[in-house]
């Protein structure tokens, strides 16, 4: 054991003595490890965000949007769902304990005194907080009387409140939505998740009857419907049945694409997994290539170091050092350097992740798994690419080395 500690001490002093070699090895290893660290953090962050979104969306919920995705991309008709569809789905699916119509209109000008803002207005039914799993923290929710009476009342998201009421309490105040004077009856809680290009908190909720009649001049078509089922175990089966039912109602042939799109919690997970998979593939290739390159850099620098340390190795062999001592020392030197590179790479990955989060709001989650993964990979690189230089140093003839 004392012999091993002595070899370790010699390796540590060698790492300190050859500063240029150590610097370049640290730099090359840290770049590869930082990519691996970002991969682990992005995967964990994506799954964490997925379950957070599902919790807010509702694991038992599904949304049906009017218009197919491909037709929307080329400016196709989005209004394909009707109030009659909502009633038909309600009658045909007793397992759906909520079937709620939704109508939205974006870019709506809203104002309170001198404060102005443009936001999304969504029309919904009574008990919106239950339907959308979005608590009302002040005031009250929309009521059945609000829907039936086409009342000019609304719930505000936190972003709208910050824009229109930076200091005052909005509950009970009157705001102008386009040309309609609307009373604020409730305040929605803050939501941490946001979709790309749109803040979920930047919206106003009004009775759907008010939105359709007074803002959209619409009596039949709606933007979407939201369903919540009694048992999530059969969610996939019920969504398939819902798709078949709506295709039948819309008289679509077998070869025709759906003129609607259904989104569920399963699709949210699939989307984030696909997004994360692309990032993992990109960063994974970059990280592996960086680690391989850094391994070759380490091996070449150590081979050069062996040539420069021939006298040192010869003297150590002459005074009793074994081949195994020299071999272990060089492997330990490589391992110590790559361990340092692993720690530095983790720190670099952490800093880069903070930049990504601030710029692109990409979910990142750091844990001990990311640190251990980077550290183990760094040690493996040190051992694998340090063997050949260590073997060359150990096989030096002590007599030839002293000469």
Image (spheres, grey):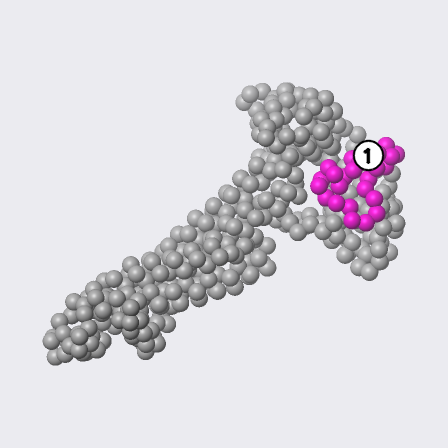
Q: Over which residues does the magenta segment extend?
A: 125-149
Given residues 368 and 198, the one toward you in this image is 368
Q: Residue furthest front?
A: 1
Could you classify mark 1 by the number of other residues whose Cα lies within 10 Å: few (under 14), some (14-19), or many (20 or more)? many
Q: State the residue at coordinates (47%, 47%).
A: 278
Position in image of residue 162 (x %, y %): 77, 56
Q: Is residue 264 something that shows in the picture?
A: yes
Judge by depth and name the residue closer to the eye, 18 or 173. Answer: 18
Disc tally is 1
Q: Is residue 288 above or below residue 337?
A: above
Which residue bears the numbered disc 1? 209
Instruction: Classify residue 243 by image quadrant.
Output: top right
Q: Quadrant of the C terminus?
A: bottom left
Q: Which of these two is toward me, 112 or 227?
A: 227
As drawn, 282 above or below 20: above
Residue 216: x percent and y percent? 78, 37
Q: Is residue 216 visible?
A: no
Compared across the picture, whether 258 is left or right of 107 comes to left
* Disc 1 element: helix
Residue appearing at x 82%, y 47% in the figure: 186
| In the image, residue 165 lies in the stretch drawn in magenta | no
Is residue 242 toward the left or the right of residue 88 in the image? left
Name above or below for residue 81 compared with residue 109. above
Q: Which quadrant holds residue 75?
A: top right
């Amino acid at each position: 054991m004392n012999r091993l500690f002595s070899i370790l001490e010699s390796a540590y002093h060698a790492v300190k003595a050859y500063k240029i070699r150590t610097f370049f090895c640290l730099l090359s290893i840290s770049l590869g490890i930082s990519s691996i660290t970002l991969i682990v953090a992005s995967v964990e962050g994506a799954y964490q965000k997925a379950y957070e979104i599902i919790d807010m969306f509702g694991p038992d919920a599904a949304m049906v949007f009017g218009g197919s995705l491909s037709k929307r991309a080329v400016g196709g008709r989005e209004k394909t769902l009707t109030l009659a569809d909502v009633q038909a789905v309600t009658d045909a699916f007793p397992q759906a304990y909520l079937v709620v119509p939704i109508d939205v209109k974006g870019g709506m000008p809203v104002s309170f005194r001198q404060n102005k803002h443009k936001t999304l207005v969504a029309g919904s039914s009574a008990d919106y907080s239950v339907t959308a799993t979005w608590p009302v923290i002040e005031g009250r929710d929309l009521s059945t009387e609000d829907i039936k009476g086409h009342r000019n009342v609304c719930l505000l998201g936190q972003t709208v409140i910050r824009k229109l009421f930076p200091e005052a309490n909005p509950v009970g105040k009157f705001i102008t939505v386009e040309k309609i004077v609307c009373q604020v009856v409730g305040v929605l809680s803050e939501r941490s998740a946001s979709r790309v290009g749109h803040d979920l908190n930047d919206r106003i909720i009004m009775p759907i009857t008010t939105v359709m009649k007074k803002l959209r001049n619409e009596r039949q078509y709606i933007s979407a419907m939201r369903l919540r089922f009694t048992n999530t175990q059969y969610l996939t089966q019920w969504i398939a049945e819902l798709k078949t039912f709506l295709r039948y109602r819309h008289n679509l042939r077998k070869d025709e694409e759906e003129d609607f799109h259904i989104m569920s919690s399963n699709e949210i997970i699939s989307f984030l997994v696909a997004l994360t998979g692309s990032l993992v593939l990109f960063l994974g290739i970059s990280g592996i290539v960086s680690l391989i390159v850094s391994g070759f850099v380490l091996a070449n620098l150590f081979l050069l170091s062996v040539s420069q340390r021939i006298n040192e190795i010869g003297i150590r062999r002459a005074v009793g050092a074994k081949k195994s001592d020299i071999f272990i020392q060089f492997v330990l030197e490589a391992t110590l350097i790559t361990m340092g590179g692993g720690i530095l790479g983790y720190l670099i990955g952490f800093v880069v992740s903070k930049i990504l989060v601030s710029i692109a709001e990409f979910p990142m989650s750091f844990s001990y798994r990311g640190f251990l993964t980077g550290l183990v990979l760094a040690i493996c690189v040190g051992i694998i690419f340090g063997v050949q230089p260590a073997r060359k140093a150990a096989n030096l003839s002590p007599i030839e080395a002293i000469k």
